[in-house]
């Protein structure tokens, strides 16, 4: 069974990746198994740059193929913000609730039709021999006015899936995987995986 390293310690992401990757015969190892790898500064200005910064660093440190994602939420009324700063929107030591509160405050009084937003995910894979690939996914919706649901993480409690009429945090894991930006990006990655793996293990 092929082993890869998922370049994250985020338990929510690890849980989602394991569910998505398990049927494809991939053994997923997390950064928690490599304590010698410290925090990897995400200094890129785009999701693609940040995803590759993490994937390349982990592949080099572990000698294994590494998969990293960078994702965030883009709000049209805010010119695409918070974007790559989604995880630290309310400050470097903030949590999900603080980020959600700041976003709701920024959109106070903004009508529904101007609250359009999307989750954006880039999934990058890098091998120690230099083979690389990446895919992207998007999840369109709107920023709601209130919190709903107790699932998911990040901005899911205020992200309204306008097609289903429910917040992302109200969806079951299967529903979310079928519709989410991360689910789309990883399905695209798995489509190109055989070619990438052949190059990564050549």
Image (tube, grey):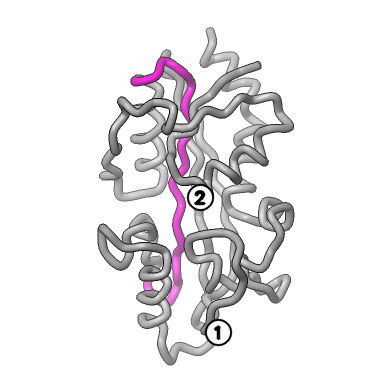
Q: Earlier in the sequence, mark 1 or mark 2?
A: 1
The image shows residue 65 at horizontal and vertical percentages of: 48, 21
Question: Which residue is disc 1 drawn over?
Answer: 113
Looking at the image, can residue 125 be seen? Answer: no
Position of residue 168 relative to residue 108, above or below, is above
Task: Please report the bounds of the magenta region as a residue range.
Answer: 61-78
Residue 175, quarter of the rendered image:
bottom right
- Report, in whole angstroms, how far the alpha carbon at label 1 lies from the one at label 2: 23 Å
On the rendered structure, is 127 left or right of 180? Answer: left
Q: Is mark 1 on a helix, strand or loop?
A: helix
Q: Identify the residue at image location x=46%, y=51%.
A: 71
Position of residue 183 relative to residue 140, above or below, is above
On the rendered structure, is 80 left or right of 3? Answer: left
Disc on res. 121: 2
Residue 56, quarter of the rendered image:
top left
Looking at the image, can residue 71 be seen? Answer: yes
């Amino acid at each position: 069974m092929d082993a890869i390293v998922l370049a994250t310690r985020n338990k929510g992401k690890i849980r989602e990746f394991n569910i998505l990757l398990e049927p494809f015969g991939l053994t997923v190892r997390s950064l928690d198994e490599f304590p010698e790898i410290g925090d990897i500064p995400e200094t890129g200005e785009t999701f693609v740059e940040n995803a590759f910064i993490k994937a390349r660093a982990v592949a080099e440190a572990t000698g294994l193929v590494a998969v990293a994602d960078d994702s965030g939420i883009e709000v049209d009324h805010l010119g695409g913000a918070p974007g790559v700063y989604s995880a630290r929107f309310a400050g470097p030591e903030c949590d999900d609730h603080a980020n959600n509160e700041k976003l709701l405050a920024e959109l106070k009084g903004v009508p529904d039709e101007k609250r359009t937003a999307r989750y954006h995910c880039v999934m990058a894979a890098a091998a120690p021999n230099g083979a690389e690939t990446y895919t992207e996914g998007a999840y369109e919706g709107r920023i709601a006015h209130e919190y709903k649901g107790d699932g998911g993480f990040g901005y899911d409690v205020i992200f309204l899936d306008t097609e289903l009429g429910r917040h992302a945090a109200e969806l079951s894991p299967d529903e979310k995987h079928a519709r989410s930006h991360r689910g789309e990006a990883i399905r695209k990655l798995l489509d190109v995986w055989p070619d990438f793996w052949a190059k990564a293990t050549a």
